[in-house]
Image (cartoon, grey):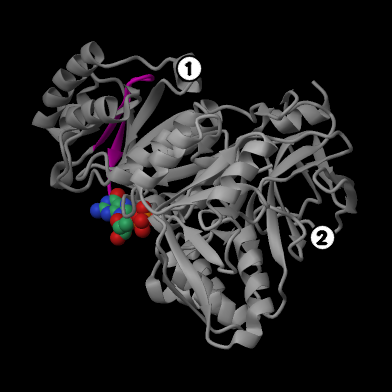
């Protein structure tokens, strides 16, 4: 193996998905702590808090008590380099999460043992399934009186339509939670919330008399449980996991550090190294020597005085080095990237290089767009970075009409970050903003004021859904001439049909059978 191959093979890039409150932030923090990336658990929350202080926009986040941004945390663990991509939990920012999921090779799903499979989990898993992303499952909060483990597995199998392969099995729960049995290597790990890493003792063998000594009658129950579980559940199958058909399941309590190490070990031992990505002309393999990457996220800078943003690129092949010249395929320009941000955890020498699987951040002034491809010269375009049909539409109204230019610029630039979309109906001068979540309108109004000096409000607009139009130029012109109030251009000057109702959409579709009405627009 070449040095490049070795570096790529040791990358693991994943995200954590969960319904809010299941324990994603806690698990993130504990993974970083077990990985040695932070010294004291608690720093992730603290860092989030201090970041808030630097920006008015973040101020809004803080007031609402939610996390709007995603970030990247990279740390070494054993012989591996782990990239953990954070995703916002609030559903109004789900598009951001969906796009982040295009940049990972696997995901960890956190389930609250009291609540089981929740609504957001279902949606997120559907997104993972679009690319057959392998999923590890962590059933959390075993220190609480939750549902029976076998019921939880049944629910995951039936609701999420994925096989479960238990890797550990809990001993009791709530007040009588004693630890887990590792089904694959016949060891028992005992839970003690007072112990430094949540584990008081580890012993070998289900028949070990020490088991009876430590947990008394629960020992016999465990032996019976395990017999049943072995008979009734799936055995872990690496291929089925990698194809997204089966999920290995771990039980634990994040807040008590218990089970976290098993998840971290599973990430490096079981989950895939960087996977190939599809481009329009061909699939791009991670071990190709030439650099290629796509932009999955744009984030406004934390400092509102400097209007620059960071484009987050997932490296799909090859190696990146500071100062390297890369081609922005869309405009054909070569950029010398001297100021890229890499995400190696602190206290290590900052490396000025990154490999397939890693994420780099490139500061720019709005010249880099979501979904764009960067290469060493080849005209590749990665596909599959979705832009979702917004479900809410509002019209921007200026308080001071002289600021129209700033308003247009602000809306356009903010839309480029991807959380909102701007539509300009052909027959009016209206600026219509579409979003998946209502909170986005507040974020935009707040940022227009702070970053662009524009005082605007949003008022309701009679559109209930949007569809991207695909057809010949003649067909598109025909529909645009007929419905100038409904046909609009989006931020990338593509045609969109804005429908006032489902019925209106259906009638129009029937009238134009040769035009495709697409729910999502792939960015490229
Ligand atoms: P997120 O919204 O998914 O990021 O969830 P958080 O990590 O913020 O956790 C939500 C709440 O559950 C917090 O109050 C945590 O302290 C709590 N929590 C997390 N893990 C556990 C656990 O293992 N046991 C218990 N009892 N509470 C937990």
Secondary structure predominantly adopted by residues drawn in magenta: strand
Question: Quick check: is 2 in the magenta stretch?
Answer: no
Residue 399 is marked as: none
- Which quadrant does the C terminus fall into? top right
Q: Which of 238 and 404 is in front in this view?
A: 404
Q: Can residue 443 be seen in this view?
A: yes
Q: Which of 501 and 440 is in front in this view?
A: 501
Give the x, y percent position of residue 520. 52, 41
- The residue that mark 2 highlights is 339
Residue 238 is marked as: 1
Q: Nearer the viewer, residue 404 or 44?
A: 404
- From the viewer's perspective, is residue 68 above or below residue 353? below
The residue depicted at 52 percent of the width and 71 percent of the height is: 444
Question: Quick check: is 180 in the magenta stretch?
Answer: yes
Q: Quadrant of residue 203?
A: top left
Magenta-drawn segment: 179-192
Give the x, y percent position of residue 328. 82, 47
Q: How crowded is mark 1: few (under 14 residues within 10 Å), some or many (20 or more)?
A: some
Give the x, y percent position of residue 460. 40, 69
Give the x, y percent position of residue 39. 53, 59
């Amino acid at each position: 193996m070449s040095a490049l191959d070795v570096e790529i093979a040791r990358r693991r890039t994943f995200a954590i998905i969960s319904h809010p409150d299941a324990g994603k932030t806690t698990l993130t923090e504990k993974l970083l702590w077990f990985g040695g990336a932070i010294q004291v658990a608690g720093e992730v929350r603290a860092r989030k808090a201090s970041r808030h202080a630097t920006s008015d926009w973040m101020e809004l986040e803080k007031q609402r008590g939610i996390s709007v941004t995603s970030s990247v945390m990279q740390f070494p663990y054993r012989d591996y380099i782990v990239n953990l991509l954070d995703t916002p939990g609030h559903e109004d920012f789900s598009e951001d999460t969906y796009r982040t999921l295009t940049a990972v090779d696997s995901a960890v799903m956190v389930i609250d043992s009291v609540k089981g499979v929740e609504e957001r989990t279902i949606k997120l898993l559907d997104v993972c399934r679009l690319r057959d992303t392998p999923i590890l499952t962590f059933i959390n909060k075993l220190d609480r009186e939750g549902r029976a483990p076998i019921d939880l597995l049944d629910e995951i199998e039936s609701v999420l339509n994925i096989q479960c392969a238990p890797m550990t099995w809990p001993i009791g729960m709530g007040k009588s939670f004693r630890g887990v049995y590792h089904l694959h290597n016949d060891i028992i790990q005992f839970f003690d919330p007072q112990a430094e890493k949540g584990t008081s003792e580890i012993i070998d063998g289900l028949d070990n008399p020490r088991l009876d000594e430590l947990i008394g009658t629960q020992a016999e129950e465990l032996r019976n449980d395990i017999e049943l579980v072995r008979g009734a559940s799936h055995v872990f199958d690496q291929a089925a996991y990698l194809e997204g058909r089966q999920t290995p399941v771990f039980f634990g309590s994040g807040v008590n550090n218990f089970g976290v190490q098993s998840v971290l070990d599973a990430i490096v031992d079981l989950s895939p190294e960087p996977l190939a990505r599809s481009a329009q002309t061909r699939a791009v393999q991670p071990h190709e020597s030439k650099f290629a990457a796509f932009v999955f996220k744009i984030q406004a800078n934390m400092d509102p005085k400097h209007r620059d943003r960071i484009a987050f690129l997932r490296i799909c092949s090859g190696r990146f080095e500071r100062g390297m010249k890369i081609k922005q395929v869309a405009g054909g320009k070569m950029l010398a990237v001297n100021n890229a941000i890499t995400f190696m955890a602190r206290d290590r020498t900052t490396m000025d290089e990154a490999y397939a699987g890693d994420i780099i951040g490139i500061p720019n002034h709005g010249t880099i767009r979501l979904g764009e491809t960067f290469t060493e010269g080849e005209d590749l375009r990665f596909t599959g970075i979705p832009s979702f049909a917004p479900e809410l539409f509002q019209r921007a109204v200026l308080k001071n009409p002289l600021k129209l230019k700033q308003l247009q610029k602000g809306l356009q630039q903010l839309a480029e970050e991807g959380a909102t979309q701007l539509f300009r109906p052909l027959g009016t001068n209206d600026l219509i903003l579409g979003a998946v979540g209502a909170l986005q309108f507040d974020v935009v109004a707040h940022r227009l004021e702070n970053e662009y000096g524009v005082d605007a409000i949003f008022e309701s607009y009679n559109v209930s859904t949007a569809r991207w139009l695909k057809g010949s130029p003649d067909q598109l012109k025909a529909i645009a001439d007929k419905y100038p109030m409904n046909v609009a251009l989006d931020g990338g000057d593509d045609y969109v049909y804005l429908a006032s109702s489902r019925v209106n959409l259906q009638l129009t579709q029937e009238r134009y059978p040769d035009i495709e009405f697409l729910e999502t627009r792939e960015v490229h």
